[in-house]
Image (cartoon, rainbow, N blue to C red):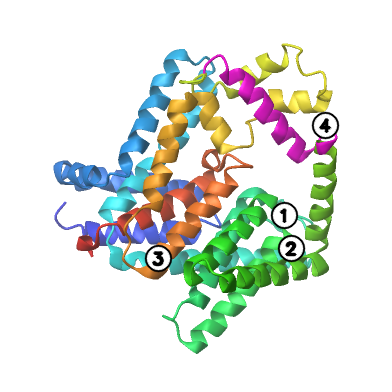
Amino acid sequence: MKYINFEKTFFYIVLALAFVLPISRALVSLFIILLPFVWIIEGDFRNKFQKIQKKKIFLPLFGFFLLSILSLLWSSDYDVAKNELRILSYFFALFIIATSLKQRYINTIITAFLSGMFISEIIAYGVFFELWTFKNATPQDPSPFMSHIEYSIFLAFTSILLLNRLFSKEYFFKEKILLLFFFLTVTGNLFITQGRTGQVAYVVAIITMTVLHFKITFKSLILALLLLSSIFGTAYSFSSNFHNRVTHTQDEITSILKGELNSSWGIRVGFWITTFHILEKDPLLGVGIGDYKLVQKQEIDTGNYKYLSEETKEFISHNHPHNQYLLVLLETGIIGLILFLSFFYKYFKLNIQNRELKQLSIIFGVIYSVGFLSEPLLIKQFTLSLFILFFGLFILLENPKTI
């Protein structure tokens, strides 16, 4: 295979993956599969495994994967387990991106991702303003290619990526005019969708980004508050979707405080309660990968949750726990959660010399860390693929000698 330029091949596959990531489920799968296929054809496995070994951040991740596979020994629902293992296989692409790509391609890949987001934006705004119809998107929920929860994460990250560039000194004035326009449209899009997960993550990301740029000072806190006030104030005034979601959230919080859990956020509280009781029996290793529905139903059937409505009980019995951390705890226990969090700790400690990309890596990690609280983003194809692409790129940056 000497006639194949594998360096360029990896670049073009990842470039294509970045571009189609916001707009095509099928093409995302195609390029995710192509990466390991080309990686195997290239050979030179000894050198590749040495590169992977040098990335210490992968140690807790390998440990988590191994524990997940071993948990099949004490799990029962093999159909769900097989699906989750298939999803975990996507992480093979992360290892390839982090070790087989060249750093000089990163900015081009990020630009390709922004181009894909721009296309998805045009379609979303066209649906919102009723200029055209597209698949299952509606003016009330103009998410053209994925669920509103996943799309809100994409929009939150894109908005922060653009805002981070606006704060950067590396761009000319004319470039910043275009960045500002794109930032305003993306941020507007975030608040006309119904994805509260991305909106909440966005708040924390704005504060994080401001602190990263200006350190923890009175000025940085005031600036963060001004940014949030202007963005959320405008969204509340001009987006009926966002206005209704805020009102609905306030009503849900009031209901939760009264002990009523028959709501979106109330159900999430119910999952915390049932997970706690399930883990009293299997705290260290959990119930096994794939068994979360089975054990939740068994727990609900004990009859100890008479304060929950029948609708809430039914939902908890047949769905994932709407929280990535709870899902990890349920399936792999405290040991699995420690390994999972260790990976994130090492990620936030990555030594990235490029200041803008280091800041972006932290913000990206914060968006996912917060998003995990209300949704298991790593069992959804789009948000998993976004995670793999950018975590792979940021881990790649750790070693400046590979430039």
Q: Residue furthest front?
A: 218
Vertical placement of 80 versus 108: above or below?
Answer: above
Horizontally, residue 48 falls left or right of residue 73, namely: left
Highlighted range, magenta = 257-282
Query: Tag 1 or tag 4, which sits nearer the N-term?
Result: 1
Say which residue label 1 marks.
137
Q: Mainly helix, strand or loop, the magenta region? A: helix
SS of the residue at dot 4? loop
Query: Looking at the image, is mark 1 or mark 3 nearer the viewer?
Result: 3
Q: Amino acid at mark 1?
A: Ala
Residue depicted at 49% across the width and 31% down the height? 84
Vertical placement of 359 versus 73: above or below?
Answer: below
Say which residue label 3 marks.
357
Q: Residue furthest top?
A: 302
Front in this rendered view, residue 93 or 171: 171
SS of the residue at dot 3? helix
Query: Looking at the image, is mark 2 or mark 4 nearer the viewer?
Result: 4
Tell me whether the residue at label 2 lies in contact with that at label 1, contact meaning CB atoms closer than 8 angstroms: yes
Query: Tag 3 or tag 4, which sits nearer the N-term?
Result: 4
Disc 4 residue crowd, few under 14, some 14–19, many 20+, Cα 10 Å: few
Disc 3 residue crowd, few under 14, some 14–19, many 20+, Cα 10 Å: some
Hey, which quadrant is residue 118 in on the image?
bottom right
Disc 1 residue crowd, few under 14, some 14–19, many 20+, Cα 10 Å: some
Say which residue label 2 marks.
127
| Residue 276 forms part of the magenta stretch | yes
Note whether residue 131 is visible: no
The label shown at residue 259 is 4
SS of the residue at dot 2? helix
Residue depicted at 42% across the width and 14% down the height? 73
